[in-house]
Image: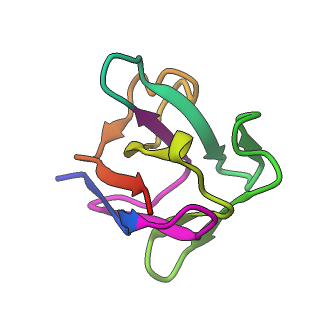
Amino acid sequence: QVQVMESGGGLVQPGGTLRLSCQASGTIIRSISWYRQTPGKGRELIAFITHGDMTWYADSLKGRATISRDEVQNTVHLQMNSLTSEDTATYSCNLNAQDLNSGLGGTWGQGTQVTVSS
């Protein structure tokens, strides 16, 4: 059974750093897309890494986020720096989607909450 689980969320002060992780079981990670969602807003694609290790970041994260792959742990990490209250959201990942933008055909995790507050 293919499963994916996010971890690493929590409460962080403005200006701080968090590293989110997305670990898969039951299959090898080829690609991972990261999304975030806040109440009343739709899900926003914020980053992805492809099978060929091409990476992409939304404008809201460019210059302060890094997505990386750990093949031994079958995990993809998303490190975000210089966090602000605008980054407060539920973050989720999608595994091996056919469409990296929408997540269509992929496996979703349950999500992890990130709260940026002093």
Residue 6 belongs to the span the image colors magenta: no
In the rendered view, tell whether residue 82 sits above or below residue 93. below
Which residue is painted at 55% across and 30% down in the image? 45
Which residue is painted at 75% across and 57% down in the image? 64
* Most distant residue in the right direction: 63
Q: Quadrant of residue 26?
A: bottom left
* Most distant residue in the front direction: 118
Q: How many marks?
A: 0
What quarter of the picture does the C terminus occupy? Answer: bottom left
Which residue is painted at 74% across and 52% down in the image? 52
Q: Quadrant of residue 71?
A: bottom right
Is 8 or 68 nearer to us in this picture?
8
Q: Position of residue 22 (x, y in %)?
A: 41, 61
Magenta span covers which residues? 12-37
Is 70 or 39 nearer to us in this picture?
39
Is 10 or 4 nearer to us in this picture?
10
Q: Position of residue 58 (x, y in %)?
A: 71, 35
* Most distant residue in the bottom direction: 72
Q: Is residue 55 left or right of residue 77?
A: right
Q: Position of residue 96 (x, y in %)?
A: 47, 42
Residue 21 belongs to the span the image colors magenta: yes
Q: Position of residue 68 (x, y in %)?
A: 65, 66
